[in-house]
Amino acid sequence: MQQVIILHGWGNEVQDNWYPWLANKLREKGYNVFVPKLVDKDKPTYQSWRESVLKVAKIDENTIIIGHSLGAVLGLKLAEEFVFDTLITVAGWDYWDRTPEHETFFKTIIDQNKIISNVKNRIVIHSDNDPYVTKILAQDYASRIKAKLVLLPGKGHFATRDGVSEIPEILNLF
């Protein structure tokens, strides 16, 4: 059975936003779904989040990872290390981000070539009105990792506060 790992964003919990909706829909389709509680959600480190994932799931060539916001960055960093089937990032980015809040995820620049080599399918889902990452930055990011770009209108940062509790476009990818 193919497994899906859904990675929540910074400051979020596993029950927030669209994560439970997507997990339930994918389970109905027969996928083995993990939504790990990423520790230190308000002051995350790459190492603590990486360990949170590996405690509940083994990443292999049949794994699909879906990451939201900083969870998308976690997915990219995991893609530098592990070989797996599909990476779907929602409201993510790959540029060198050394802001204090994200610094632990960017000790080194993301290696796009390693991601392209390790992950067969790469999909970037983004909104045309994301308040943190512009449409142009998302297009550039998708290009750098040779990903299919799915640009959706009016979804903000894909959070409940933006009116997003479901993302049916993700299900269309399965």
Image: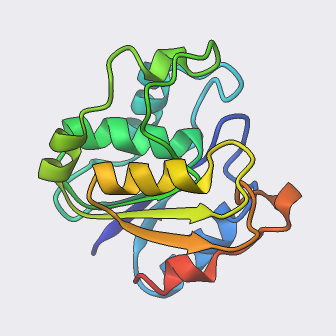
The count of marks equals: 0
| For residue 123, above or below residue 28 | above
Between 168 and 25, the residue placed more toward the observer is 168
| Residue 37 in sight from this viewpoint | yes
Q: Which residue is drawn at 34% across and 66% down?
A: 3
Indicate the colouring scheme: rainbow
Q: Could you say where residue 95 lies in the image, as x and y percent from the top left?
A: 44, 33
Q: Is residue 40 left or right of residue 76?
A: right
State which quadrant residue 155 falls in. bottom right
Q: Is residue 25 above or below residue 56?
A: below
Residue in the image at 32% along x and 62% along y: 147
Side of 154 where 83 appears, left or right: left
Say which of 35 and 80 sits in front.
80
In the orientation shown, which residue stands out farthest toward the front?
Answer: 136
Could you say where residue 94 lies in the image, as x and y percent from the top left?
A: 42, 39
- x, y (%) of residue 139? 46, 57
Note whether 95 is above or below 7 in the view shown. above
Asked whether residue 6 is in view, the answer is no
Say left or right for 62 vs 105.
left
Outermost residue, left direction? 117
Quadrant into which the C terminus falls: bottom left
Query: Which residue is located at x 73 percent, y 59 percent?
Result: 129
Report x, y in % for residue 143.
Answer: 33, 56
Q: Which of 62 and 164 is in front in this view?
A: 164
The image shows residue 28, relative to residue 104, as above or below, that is below
Q: Quadrant of the N terminus?
A: bottom left
